[in-house]
Amino acid sequence: MNVTIDLSDRIAAALEAQARAAHMPAERYLADIVSCALEAQHRQDVQNLEAHLVHMASQVVPETTPEEMEGALREALSHVRQRRNWQP
């Protein structure tokens, strides 16, 4: 994927200096930063889902039907999924 990012001169200079210190091209360094941020977000989403499911499970009464459990799972997933914008 190729992306153009407009950065202020100050931020661009800082990024380039950090990339040089890491002995990497600035583009590769920035790609690694974005990749790490997305991976961290994914890990946090997984932790949030686990915590929500544990909380929901603690609220379930023994007479809960499979349909009710599926509905609860859908609700849990809706809390951690990214909001989608389907408009072009």
Image (cartoon, helix red, strand yellow):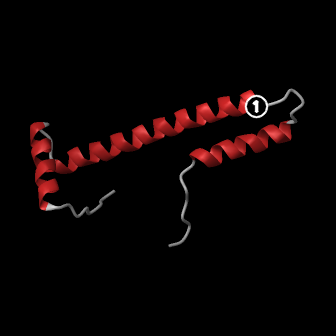
Q: Secondary structure at mark 1?
A: helix
Residue drawn at (57%, 45%), measured in percent from left and top? 80
Classify mark 1: residues with Cα within 10 Å, few (<14), some (14-19) or many (20+).
Answer: few
- Tell me: 77 left or right of 85: right
Residue drawn at (13%, 42%), measured in percent from left and top? 18
Quadrant hosting residue 66: top right
Q: Residue furthest right?
A: 63
* Circle 1: residue type: Gln
Please provide percent x and percent y for residue 81: 57, 48
Pick the front one: 54 or 37? 54
- Tell me: 59 left or right of 39: right
Residue drawn at (21%, 44%), measured in percent from left and top? 29
Residue drawn at (26%, 63%), measured in percent from left and top? 4
Quadrant hosting residue 62: top right
The mark total stands at 1
Taking 25 as reference, is 64 above or below it? Answer: above
For mark 1, what is the residue? Answer: 59
Quadrant hosting residue 52: top right
- Tell me: 85 left or right of 66: left
Taking 87 as reference, is 72 above or below it? Answer: above
Q: Residue furthest bottom?
A: 88
Please provide percent x and percent y for residue 8: 17, 61
Q: Residue furthest front?
A: 59
Taking 29 as reference, is 88 above or below it? Answer: below
